[in-house]
Image: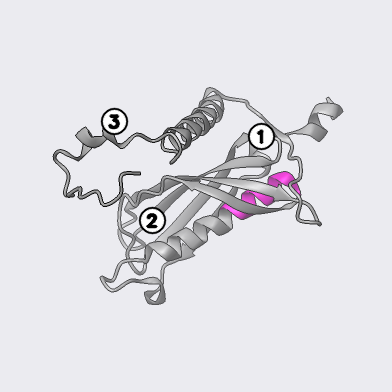
């Protein structure tokens, strides 16, 4: 069991939650909390979670799908929760959930869920191996499997649209009802 403990960690060991009051200085021109401020906080909590899991500082390799579902108001409390969903050799997928709470009414809103791929770095800046995770529920298995599928889909999407193999004619039907006009100046 000690051997497993050194190579694998329970997900709860690295989970991180922060709550912060949203101030007027965090707002945009429409009076809502600026998306860039939320993204900055999300990156910080993903860093904290991944670093806690890996035992090394981590860098953000990618962010998958950031949809702002509900606006966040000045004066609301924002709670962000981060958890390791997937571990590779040197990378981890950190799942984040963002909720806001109106202090006066107690109403809570789900504002965002996102996935940050973080890479552990050693003291020389080289990618460092990370411990695996111990999956203890069907929900954790689902999250791990979803991360694997998301990676596969990302690789397929990247190769399918590679400039070396992309064939515009195969996609022209997508433009039929779009707000665009095609005027090809070069044939490449």
- Where residue 51 sits in the image (x, y, percent)? 69, 51
**Residue 121: % across, % down:** 73, 51
Q: Is residue 45 magenta?
A: no
Label 3, residues with CA under 10 Å away: few <14, some 14-19, many ≥20:
few
In whole angstroms, how far apart are the C-alphas of marks 1 and 3?
35 Å
Q: What secondary structure is marked by label 1?
A: loop
> Which residue is pictured at 43% across the width and 41% down the height?
163
Image coords of residue 25 (percent x, y): 40, 77
Which residue corresponds to mark 1?
A: 88
Total tally of numbered discs in the picture: 3
Q: Name which of mark 1 and mark 3 comes first in the sequence.
A: 1
Nearer the camera: disc 1 or disc 2: 1
The residue stretch that appears in magenta: 46-55
Q: Which residue lies furthest to the right in this view?
A: 2
Residue at image point 51% right, 29% down:
152
The answer to whether residue 48 is magenta is yes
Is label 2 or label 3 in front? Answer: 3
> Do residues under tags 1 and 3 come within 8 Å of each other at their CB atoms?
no
Q: Which residue in the protein does label 3 denote?
A: 170
Q: Which of marks 2 and 3 is nearer the N terminus?
A: 2
Of 172 and 187, the residue lying toward us: 187
Q: Main secondary structure of the magenta part?
A: helix
- Residue 79 versus residue 86 in the image, above or below: below
Which image quadrant for residue 165? top left
| Left or right: residue 181 compared with residue 133 | left
Residue that label 2 marks = 100
Compared to residue 168, the image places residue 181 above or below, namely: below
- Marks 1/2: CA distance? 31 Å
User: Which one is in front, 104 or 112?
Assistant: 112
| Residue at the (78%, 52%) spot, across then down | 122
């Amino acid at each position: 069991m000690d051997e497993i403990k050194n190579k694998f960690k329970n997900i709860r060991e690295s989970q991180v939650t922060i709550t912060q009051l949203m101030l007027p200085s965090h707002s945009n021109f429409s009076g809502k909390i600026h998306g860039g401020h939320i993204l900055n906080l999300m990156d910080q909590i993903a860093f904290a979670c991944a670093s806690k899991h890996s035992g090394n500082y981590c860098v953000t390799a990618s962010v998958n799908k950031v949809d702002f579902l509900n606006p966040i108001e000045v004066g609301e409390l924002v709670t962000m929760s981060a958890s390791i969903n997937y571990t590779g050799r040197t990378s981890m997928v950190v799942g984040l959930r963002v909720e806001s709470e109106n202090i006066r009414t107690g109403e809570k809103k789900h504002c965002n869920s996102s996935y940050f791929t973080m890479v552990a770095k050693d003291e020389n800046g080289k990618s460092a191996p990370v411990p695996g995770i111990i999956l203890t529920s069907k929900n954790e298995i689902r999250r791990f499997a979803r991360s694997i599928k998301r990676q596969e889909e990302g690789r397929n999407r990247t190769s399918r649209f590679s400039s070396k193999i992309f064939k515009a004619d195969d996609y022209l039907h997508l433009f039929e009802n779009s707000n665009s006009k095609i005027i090809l100046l070069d044939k490449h």
